Image: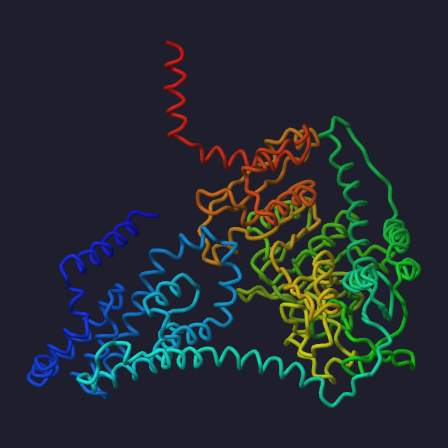
Amino acid sequence: MPINKIIVVACLLLLLGAFYALGFERYTELDFLKQQNAALVNYYEERPRQASTWFFVVYIISTAVSIPGASILSLAAGAVFGLGWGLLLVSFASTIGASLAFLLSRYVLRDWLQQRFVTRLADMNAGVKKEGAFYLFALRLIVVVPFWLVNVLMGLTPIKLRTYFWVSQLGMLPATILFVNAGTQLSSLEQLSDVLSPAVAVSFALLAVLPLISKSVLAAMRRYQALTGYNKPAHFDYNLIVIGGGAAGLVSSYIAATVKAKVLLIEQHKMGGDCLNTGCVPSKSLIQSTRFLAALADSEQYGIRSASAEFDFAEVMQRAADVIKKIEPHDSVERYQQLGVDCVQAQARLISPWQVEFAGKTVSARRIIIATGAKPHIPVIEGIQQVDFYTSDTIWSLRKRPERLLVVGGGPIGCELGQVFSRLGCTVTIVEAGERLLMAEDEAAADLLSGQFVAEGIELKLQHSIESFVVEGDESYALIRAQQGRQLKLAFDAVLFAVGRQANTQNTGLQQLGVELTASGRIVVDQYMRSSVPSIYACGDVAGPYQFTHAAAHYAWYSTLNSLFSGLWQFKADHRLIPRVTFCQPEIASVGHNEQSAKKAGLLTETTTFQLDELDRAIIDGQTSGYIKVLTPLAKDKILGVTIVGEHASEMLPEFVLAMKHGLGLNKILATIHAYPTWAEANKYTAGLWKKKHQPKRLLKLLTRYHAAKRR
């Protein structure tokens, strides 16, 4: 803890110690107040402004430093100032003092506590950010919880001061009225419990719990109200119907069949979804082909004077199609039927919370999972219909190489395909509205990738946006504008849009059933992957929050088990530790926080960075560009986030994901044997760098003296 914070804590302890050592606690007793009541009233009548000011200041200070006695002061306000003026003084003084205590707790303790228990507090922080005002109001109403404790605890959370102030004033008002009013009847009070009797305390607690209960009841009523007006079948054809045969739908169907549920899978197009047919598989196939070409072009570093390859663009593109065909059996109807899944190729539409219509038939199930995925977003740009444009769904039909390819979007898809087509001989320009590529990733990683792109001849137009397309004769042009206002005119042959994806919720019957959707069209799901209609669940790209194949499979597990076993077991979806990989060269793989997101979250972290040019295997392979960057709390080996940039980054990341999942720190990775020479050794060396920075210096000094003594 910094010295300035230690000084503040010491001053507070001294103040509290002096309070008791000097016997000031007697001033906070009911008997003392009753004895001095007449004198206090006289003082107020003689000097009303001065008395009010002193009372106001004393109340604020005592509350700010958490000195006991707020109850007595509130009684005194009623006894001396009367109900109206006393209530006004106490209401504002208590709130101001509470806010100062809140800020003091935040200044002294929050950073230390958040760093020490960062993982455990993650859910609490998320809950406070979402409904902090609601929880604070409930705590203020539960008068048996000391107000000073609420001040200290809430200071450790991310709730905003403005919110804390007005909610505290409102939440403390009932108790304030109770005590100030009791003070007006001071002579009849024998003890504080006369004011706050068990019955009154229970009433306040019920008042606090009532909003929580009401909220849960209303949520349940809203869910089940969505079922009214529909006749629930007396008998169900299936336990589960899954709509969508992509990654999420396939995993959902597989799990349901594994636990012996009767399940129907409906896919309107191709089994395997985007990942197999238009996403992961074809893109990584092209990446592999073009990496081979890049290695040949860089042959001199391997001691080979020259190397070259002849290739046909159409044949390379066809290879991607051939790879899809080889993997298709893994996701085929035949395989899933063998696993016990009924499969249908048709367009499905929900007609009730339990019924699905397709191909003129209606079938029912106790639960339905929507896994219809997403499609590439095509922006509305003037002149777009005049030019040849593609998305990650349609680019695979190319068999003639476009000489000039304009890529719109600098995210993972735009970066991967931009580099691929550049290596296949296209002149590539990437237009990105943000200040850098891969805005969600570590800034240094994006800079390194940008440098690689420029070295390969890819032109980057960062902080630019496309205003319109025009065709002049045989030439197509994009009119793009920089954020500074300068307009450029770029000639191109084809455009690839990689500017995000939108959920496939159209023509599914979801809107007619009243299933809640976000503004972008995704299905809103709760922590159990359940939609606003309780019989309908969702997972994968159609629900989010992450649009990765492995994330779709991850959430499919929760969606399936919760849909089948709700009432017996329920599992809250785990949103932590979702790995991210951009398969460019160099690869960028990450999990958890990077420096930018940690700073935004208010975390105090330290960074350990290992440069891959120090790794023997990287030197052997001639791939020394890149690094491993690990974020940890100050002076602790707990892993908060990892970014790996370089060859095989995606293969090195899982060791860190495993460690984070099971609470293993860098010391455990350092103590693990890694084969030599391997890329995974870099993980151990990163842990070694952290250990070197945190050597036990006192112990090492003692050992130095010990060994010196042994030499005598």
Residue 485 seen from this side: yes
Can residue 381 be spotted in the picture?
Answer: no
Question: Residue 434 versus residue 641: which sits nearer the camera?
Answer: 641
Q: Which residue is rendered at x = 40% and y = 61% of the image? A: 156
What colour scheme governs how the chains and residues are painted in the rendered image of this protein?
rainbow
Q: Position of residue 190 (x, y in %)?
A: 21, 79
**What x and y, as percent, mark residue 198?**
36, 78
Relative height, residue 641 to residue 610 (above, below): below
Q: Please, which residue is most extreme toward the bottom here?
A: 229
Quadrant containing the C terminus is top left
**Which residue is found at the position 87% from the left and 68% from the top?**
269
Is 699 drawn above or below residue 282 in the view shown? above
Q: Which of 602 and 137 is in front in this view?
A: 137
Measuring 68% from the left and 40% from the top, which residue is drawn there?
Answer: 647
413 with respect to 346 (left or right): left
Question: Taking 421 as reference, is 2 left or right?
Answer: left
**Quarter location, residue 145:** bottom left
**Image check: 99 left or right of 342?**
left
In-front residue for pair 418/649: 649
**Image quadrant where residue 694 sits:** top left
How many tags in the picture?
Answer: 0
Name the residue furthest top: 712
Q: Is residue 619 left or right of residue 270?
A: left
> Residue 570's spot in the image, x, y percent?
66, 66
Residue closest to the eye, 499 or 567: 567
Spot occupied by residue 33 in the image (x, y as percentages of width and height):
15, 76
Above/below status of 532 relative to 117: below
